[in-house]
Image (cartoon, grey):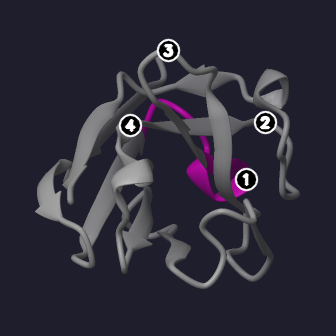
Amino acid sequence: QVQLVESGGGLVQAGGSLRLSCAASGLTFSRAAMGWFRQAPGKEREFVATVDWSGFSTLYADSVKGRFTISRDNAKNTVYLQMNTLKPEDTAVYYCAASNVRTIVVRSTAYDYWGQGTQVTVSS
């Protein structure tokens, strides 16, 4: 059974930083593209960032480019999202996702497994 467990969310002031982690089990992590998505209240889930199986190829949503960094440690079966210069509009539940596709994936429908989400709240 595949499990994705996010951690690291919380309350932070605007301009601050948080690092989200997502620990994966039950899948061949080193063969899976990983992604982060977020969903704010009253809005649809949106793509944030993705990393391919190797960690060398990444892609970001324009809204987070230059502020967020996605990375992975295949030895630890963990993917990270470093979030800097946070803004109130970054407030959302952040979800980790895994895809059986090895290359970077943007569409949420291409992801096969999802975590339960972690809340990030940025105060102004």
- The three-letter code of the residue at mark 1 reads Arg
Mark 1 or mark 4: whose residue is earlier in sequence: 1
Instruction: Please name the residue shown 72% across and 73% down the image.
Output: 54
Is 23 situated left or right of 70 in this image? left
- Local SS, label 1: helix
- Local SS, label 2: loop
Q: CA distance from mark 4 to mark 2?
A: 26 Å
Residue 111 place in picture, x, y as percent: 74, 29
- The three-letter code of the residue at mark 2 reads Asn
Report the disc number at residue 52: none
Write down the quadrant of residue 124 in the picture.
bottom left
Mark 3 or mark 2: whose residue is earlier in sequence: 3
Residues in magenta, as a range: 25-35
Mark 4 or mark 2: whose residue is earlier in sequence: 4
Report the number of numbered marks: 4
- The three-letter code of the residue at mark 3 reads Gly
Report the disc number at residue 42: 3
Q: Residues within 10 Å of mark 4 (few under 14, many from 20)?
A: many
Report the disc number at residue 100: 2
Instruction: Please name the residue shown 73% across and 60% down the image.
Output: 61
Q: Residues within 10 Å of mark 1 (few under 14, many from 20)?
A: some
- The three-letter code of the residue at mark 4 reads Ala
Nearer to us: label 4 or label 2: 4
Q: Which residue matches tag 1? A: 31
Is 112 situated left or right of 7 in this image? right
Instruction: Please name the residue shown 76% across and 63% down the image.
Output: 52
- Local SS, label 4: strand
Mark 3 or mark 4: whose residue is earlier in sequence: 3
Is 47 situated left or right of 88 in this image? right
| Residue 23 in the image: above or below residue 84 | above
Q: Which residue matches tag 4? A: 92
